[in-house]
Amino acid sequence: MSARPKTLPPTLRDKRRYIAFQVVGERKFTSREIKNALWETSLRVLGELGTAEAKPWFIKFDEKSQTGILRCDRRYVERVRFALALISRINDSHAVVKTLGVSGTIKRLKMKFLKEFGWK
């Protein structure tokens, strides 16, 4: 009989927060461009150690509405939001990343902040 790996109980898991954001720029950006810009800025602003601790993770980006979801550690939400606010150029095009809101679940984030953009 094979032993199944045990999962961590909820009290020992990392607490995550989800950030809804919107990109306003000179043109429409692709998901890959946004993902690269988020990583580059996070590394530049927070450093490698800060990025590792914040654990930013690109969840989804809607290219039509230019809105997306980013996950990070609960303790580093403000630092990740700060890094997002410092994005001013994406692939030599002017852009601004606007934080729409923060939530503990993707479902609530979509309901509260992304519903007006057509997210379900």
Image (cartoon, rainbow, N blue to C red):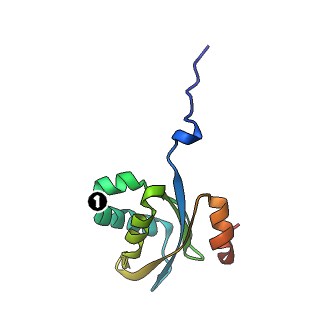
Residue closest to the far front = 11
The amino acid on which the numbered mark 1 sits, given as a three-letter code, is: Gly
Q: Identify the residue shown where x is 62% and y is 13%.
A: 1
In this rendering, does residue 41 appear at all? yes
Residue labelled with disc 1 = 47
Q: Between 32 and 5, which is closer to the camera in this rendering? A: 5
Q: Position of residue 7 (x, y in %)?
A: 57, 33
Q: Position of residue 12 (x, y in %)?
A: 52, 39
Relative to 22, say whether 54 is above or below. Answer: above
Q: Position of residue 17 (x, y in %)?
A: 53, 58
Q: Identify the residue shown where x is 55% and y is 41%.
A: 11
Q: Position of residue 92 (x, y in %)?
A: 34, 79
Q: Between 87 and 107, which is closer to the camera in this rendering? A: 107
Residue 67 placement: quadrant:
bottom right
Give the quarter of the figure containing the C terminus.
bottom right
Residue 80 placement: quadrant:
bottom left
Q: Identify the residue shown where x is 33% and y is 56%.
A: 50
